[in-house]
Amino acid sequence: MDPQTIKTTPLHAQHIQLGARMMPFGGFDMPVQYSGIIDEHMAVRQAAGLFDVSHMGEFLVEGPTALASIQRIVSNDAEKLYDGKAMYTAMCMPHGGIVDDLLVYRRSESSYMLVVNASNIQKDWDWVSQHVLEGTTLTNVSDDMALLAIQGPKAFDIVQTLLDTSIADLKFYHFIEPAAGKFLGLNNVILSYTGYTGEKGLEIYCNAEDAVTIWQALLEAGTSHGLKPVGLGARDTLRLESGFCLYGNDITEETSTYEAGLGWITKLGKGDFVGKTALEKIKADVPDRKLVGFVMAERGIPRHGNAIVNAAKEEIGVVTSGTQSPILSKGIGMGYVPNDKQYTTPGSIIGISSRGKTREAIVTKPPFHKS
């Protein structure tokens, strides 16, 4: 990417000041690590970690037809949302492939927020714009908002010290919008019990100009609890230990929700939506392949693009994500294999082939660190 076109988040100077190693990701200059991937990973699993995920995109979907528009473009059933409830879903192509996976937040009956992946912001904006109904107003607020994530067993305790409203009863995939001044004296803040690590935590949406205030306050309040800043390196190892898909690796425009194990966010019983007809057929015919998780039985770290082979060393699939699990001290990964019980049943043996060498792996249902 042209260095002159790469974007920065409102927290860029903070990362530089903390000595983060930076690299381009999704069009942004982002921190990969601070103290080290393993150290940061373990902080999230044992205490808390603070992430800058302001590269993510946010779209406001508002108006009398907002819900109908969302129902038309996502696979999950937004009718089930209520004020303060969030939902994980996908937008699909007419042929059933995934445009993106995203979150939908219901703020009121006529006001929703979509949160999309950084590398897909423009593509998703064009897609949503193309498919919404008359009477729906779209606003791309990606550049006006920042997003911080605080994740780990101590995350709620740390945030509570900065908040005048109790979050003790906040449920998973629910959010609050504190009254003006209740959180660090700021306005327009959303505290969402969501995340991408498999740990309890909050994602904090705010005005871009307030990001530094929140970042510094969380670091100050959390240091005594073991809070550490965390980069994209540990974000990836954490999400993979938890078995969460990464767009561009595990899910793409060429994969359907049923292949990717996301049938649970595909509600064929609701009204019509883009891709529904294709997905009905894919489900009825049973997908030819399936995304599975695996843990290496031998030393070696699986990598994206490695071949998956059977006992006869015949190539049967491909690794979509792979890394070394800091918790297990073993290689872990996900990949597509034929939808056959001999390859998809937990405990089955497959081979991961790289540079002419094949190593055994055991098919394992994520989350790996809790298996």
Image (cartoon, rainbow, N blue to C red):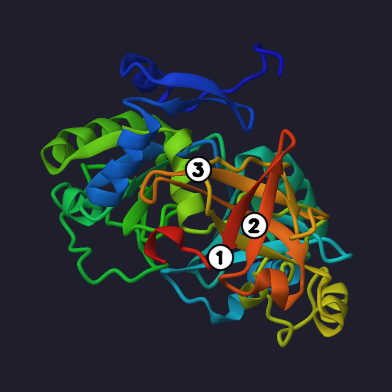
Query: Where does the image place residue 129, in percent across and percent down from the top left?
Result: 77, 52
For label 2, the residue is 101
Q: Residue at x 17, y 40 (%)?
A: 226
In terms of image quadrants, where is residue 345? bottom right
In the rendered structure, which amino acid carries the disc numbered 3? Asp
34 with respect to 8 (left or right): left
Q: CA distance from mark 1 to mark 2?
A: 7 Å
The total of numbered circles placed on residues is 3
**Can you say whether 122 is above or below 341 in the image?**
above
For label 3, the residue is 236
In the rendered structure, which amino acid carries the disc numbered 1? Tyr
Q: Are marks 2 and 3 in contact (CB under 8 Å)?
A: no
134 with respect to 81 (left or right): right
Query: Where does the image place residue 40, in percent across and percent down from the top left?
Result: 33, 36
Q: Residue at x 32, y 55 (%)?
A: 201
Q: In front of the other: label 1 or label 3?
A: 3
Q: Residue at x 26, y 46 (%)?
A: 48
In the rendered structure, which amino acid carries the disc numbered 2? Asp
287 with respect to 4 (left or right): right
In terms of image quadrants, where is residue 136? bottom right
**Can you say whether 366 is above or below 57 in the image?**
below
Q: Are marks 1 and 2 in contact (CB under 8 Å)?
A: yes
**Which residue is at the front of the view, 299 or 202?**
299
N-term-proximal mark, 1 vs 3:
1
Q: CA distance from mark 1 to mark 3?
A: 19 Å
Query: Where does the image place residue 289, in percent across and percent down from the top left?
Result: 79, 67
Q: CA distance from mark 2 to mark 3?
A: 16 Å
